[in-house]
Image (tube, rainbow, N blue to C red):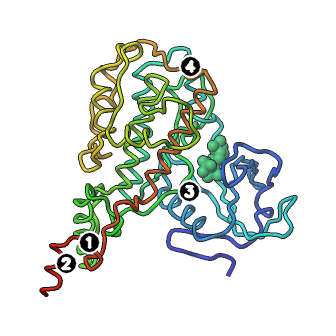
Amino acid sequence: MDESVQPNMVIKSSSIVEDYEVLWRKSLGTGVSGPVRLCVKRNTGEKYALKCLVDSKKARTEVLLHQRCCPHPNIVQIYDVYCNSVQFPREAVARSRLLVVMELMNGGELFDQIIREKHFTEKKAAAITKQIVSAVCHCHSLNIAHRDLKPENLLLKEKSEDLQNVTIKLADFGFAKEDIGLVTPQFTPYYVAPQVLEAQKQQRLERSGLKTPPGTPYTYDKSCDMWSVGVIIYIMLCGYPPFFPETPSKQMTPNMKRKIMAGEYRFPENEWSMVSGMAKDVIQRLLEVDPVKRMTVQEFIHHPWLLGEEAPELALLSPAIMQDKDALNEVMHAHAQQLTAMRTPDTSFQLKPLKSAENPILKKRLKAR
Ligand SMILES: Nc1ncnc2c1ncn2[C@@H]1O[C@H](COP(=O)(O)OP(=O)(O)OP(=O)(O)O)[C@@H](O)[C@H]1O
């Protein structure tokens, strides 16, 4: 048998070069897992993007969850996956790698296109958001949280003069997670207690053979995706992020964490006076501190702002502000850091086992048992 099969995933063990010509030196972009390369299907001449991942449980989860979310018009499509032994120059030995053939996104990253826009308006920002939300809605309805929603992972199908007509797709499922709300109780911050209850309810439903209804349940990881969408909209509308450190910093400062936890951000008059109240309402609901109260994707998809009917046609200041490449890189770095912080379980909230409690009243009670 040529293929190893996991539910929803077919991995070919035949050599990729039989089917595709891989242009190993042609990098389309680089991430932590190395360059994404160009490849051409031999029997059609069609071009694709190729991501090479060292074979591991994590890599297989990435591919599996990405494939589960395909096909969708706003998610980068996976066409083929191979598991081949590959040795790159400067490597001592060959390594088993997953070679993921994806649709080619020729238009680059979303923010690079926004910078080039001559007349970027709130209406366009709403149209872009609609596509992003459609992708997120699809993932969440399958109980998959993306957890790495950042501008670098929003790719354009092709280059265009006008963002209004371009298809935007979500890429990179490297941090995606099946999210049915199974949060280990000892790592659960107190404020997410309702979702633990919800998760337990869902577990009971699943055990009894009932399927999880689409769009539910509410869970922490999904709410993080919504927070990210809020940050991305905020930046599109004004050109800078809602939360930023006073001085440039490579690390996430305690003060930054405090600001995020307290929802401490503003709508400075200079850039925001030209933005509608409806857009601000959307941002406020997405940057809501309490993940339980934060707007879900199901709620957002019906929000009138997404229709863009009442959005002003005024040219926003954001493209000009984002042209400062260093500042923009700092913005993207800060957002990536914030996402990392959100993905890390907060061990400071670990609940002590009852037996090790120092509380004298508890000790007395335990003795009396
Ligand atoms: N389908 C595609 N078509 C064209 N370019 C792509 C495609 N997928 C990825 N790229 C380019 O390659 C870059 C890295 O891709 P990707 O984010 O999937 O890799 P990664 O190693 O997981 O990165 P990260 O460091 O963001 O986790 C992207 O930012 C983009 O510029």
Cα–Cα span, label 1 and label 3: 41 Å
Q: What amino acid type should be assigned to the residue bearing mark 1? A: Glu
Q: What amino acid type should be assigned to the residue bearing mark 4? A: Glu
Name the mark nearer the viewer: 2 or 4: 2
Q: Is the residue under label 2 in contact with that under label 1 (CB below 8 Å)?
A: yes
Name the mark nearer the viewer: 3 or 4: 3
Q: How packed is label 3: few (under 14 Cα within 10 Å), some, or many (20 or more)? A: some
Question: Is residue 104 among what the camera can see?
Answer: no
Cα–Cα span, label 1 and label 2: 7 Å
The mark found on residue 117 in the picture is 4
Which of the marked residues, 4 or 1, is nearer the chain's N terminus? 4
Compared with 272, 113 (above or below) is: below
Q: Residue at x 55, y 16 (%)?
A: 320
Q: Which residue is mark 3?
A: 174
Cα–Cα span, label 3 and label 4: 30 Å
Q: Which residue is mark 1?
A: 358
Say if disc 3 is inside 8 Å of ligand 1. Answer: yes
